[in-house]
Amino acid sequence: MAGLFEPIEINGMVLKNRSVRSATWTGMAERDGRCSERLVAFMEELARGDVGLMITGFAYVLPNGQALPGQLGIYDDALIPALSELTKRIHDAGGKICMQIVHAGAQTVLRETPERPVWGPSAVYNEVFRKTPKAMTQADIRETVLAFARAAARVRQAGFDAVQFHGAHGYLVSQFLSPSTNKRTDKYGGPIENRARFLFEIYRAVRKTVGNDFPVLIKLNAKDFVRGGLAAKDALFVAKGLDEMGIDAIEISGGGPSSGDLGPARTKIKKLADEAYFSPLAAKIKKQVRVPVILVGGIRSFKTAESILNSGTADMISMARSFVREPGLIKRWKEGDLKKATCISCNGCFRAAGSPDGLHCVVERRLSEKKDE
Ligand SMILES: Cc1cc2nc3c(=O)[nH]c(=O)nc-3n(C[C@H](O)[C@H](O)[C@H](O)COP(=O)(O)O)c2cc1C
Ligand code: SF4
């Protein structure tokens, strides 16, 4: 079985090791979603830290698909030049970069306006975001599928190495998959075969525009951890379907803002046993698909990373918060310092990403401010 520092190829994309920087919103994009110099510099530091594949923060495919301020956009050709600068600089630094694309659906903090209606599969009130989306018409669904495809074409044009569409964490694709938010009675609602239709249409449309020779990935919930949400057996159906259709890798996550303590970015990761909390679910999916599986969620130590790979639970390991505190973590491990990541999983970085300074580790900053005193 492969170790962390063994290379892997995903549909022609050769990665120097099996680590992934999972998609992370930085709050550093311009108001219109354009990539900024600050964001490029932030990503360059990650590339220098030897991570195998870095995935950008989620980028919205339509103006009404934006979730948070300072989020990257990919809804217009005018956004391509700044992204081309990003990919060029990452490649110059020896890195590989994938863009994550999303529609937020009802999970948005932005105010609803007539030009920016809040969409969802059904008009089900979202208690966390305090929004009731408008149930999408067939035309809205067609427009969104097309928007994902056009966004993916821009991703390729901007020089990214791969595209990942967001099918996790309660965003629009997740909202269609979940019986708790999808109450439709047409061909997009009801049994999982119907609830997965929107996602499968997006996959097919994306594949058609980018071609067979460009890596297409998905981040998928293995379970929603909300009452009446996506069940593990239905997530397995989706993973198997995508595998048969030719997806190039599946990143397994779980939960979302409505899952309380059982969300994607859990706290209180202290012992080895607290790490990699989606492992059992990922292992089940991995057994039933041929495509590479990437596991995210609470991985903090080299030992856990290696055991996930050696046991065949997943083909790659993915981390987000560990890299916020230590962009050079993989390099550190590679150079022989195998101490676990210093991130204490406090989730202070969510708040930081929404601050004027953008994403940073609040613990690390407090420590360095103390040192300067
Ligand atoms: C500040 C912050 C921003 C995030 N932004 C995204 C995002 O844009 N897309 C996504 O799929 N997940 C996002 N996540 C979730 C992470 O990718 C990851 O799934 C989660 O944090 C668990 O992994 P970890 O324990 O290694 O942090 C974000 C997490 C944090 C802390
Ligand atoms: S603020 Fe720092 S220590 Fe806390 S979760 Fe984020 S990266 Fe980890």
Image (spheres, rainbow, N blue to C red):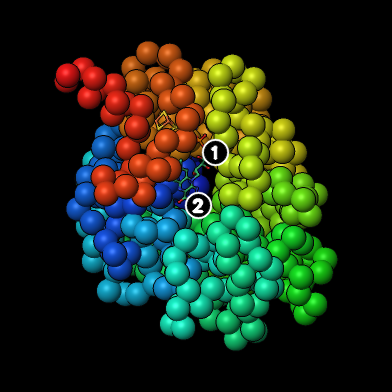
- 268 lies above or below 287: above
Is any part of residue 84 visible from this angle? no
Q: Amino acid at mark 2?
A: Asn
Q: Residue at x 72, y 67 (%)?
A: 182
Can you give x and y, in whole percent of width and height, for residue 91 in the image? 27, 47
Note whether ligand 1 is within 8 Å of mark 2. Answer: no
Is any part of residue 257 visible from this angle? yes
- Left or right: residue 244 versus residue 84 is right
Can you give x and y, in whole percent of width and height, for residue 102 in the image? 49, 62
Q: Residue at x 46, y 24 (%)?
A: 344
Note whether ligand 1 is within 8 Å of mark 1. Answer: yes
Can you give x and y, in whole percent of width and height, for residue 155 in the image? 38, 63
Query: How far is mark 1 from mark 2, CA to CA?
Result: 29 Å
- Left or right: residue 239 versus residue 106 is right
Can you give x and y, in whole percent of width and height, for residue 134 in the image? 61, 77
- The crowd level at tag 1 (other Cα within 10 Å; few <14, some 14-19, many 20+) is many
- Left or right: residue 33 versus residue 67 is left
Query: Where the N terminus falls, by quadrant?
Result: top right
Nearer to me, 28 or 362: 362
Nearer to me, 121 or 306: 121
The residue singled out by tag 2 in the image is 11
Q: Quadrant of ligand 2?
A: top left
Q: Amino acid at mark 1?
A: Ala
First reached walking from the N terminus: tag 1 or tag 2: 2
Q: Quadrant of residue 75?
A: bottom left
Query: What is the secondary structure assignment of the residue under circle 2?
Result: loop
Front: mark 1 or 2: 1
**Which of the numbered marks, if any, corresponds to residue 76?**
none
- 29 lies above or below 21: below
Q: Residue at x 43, y 22 (%)?
A: 341
The residue singled out by tag 1 in the image is 265
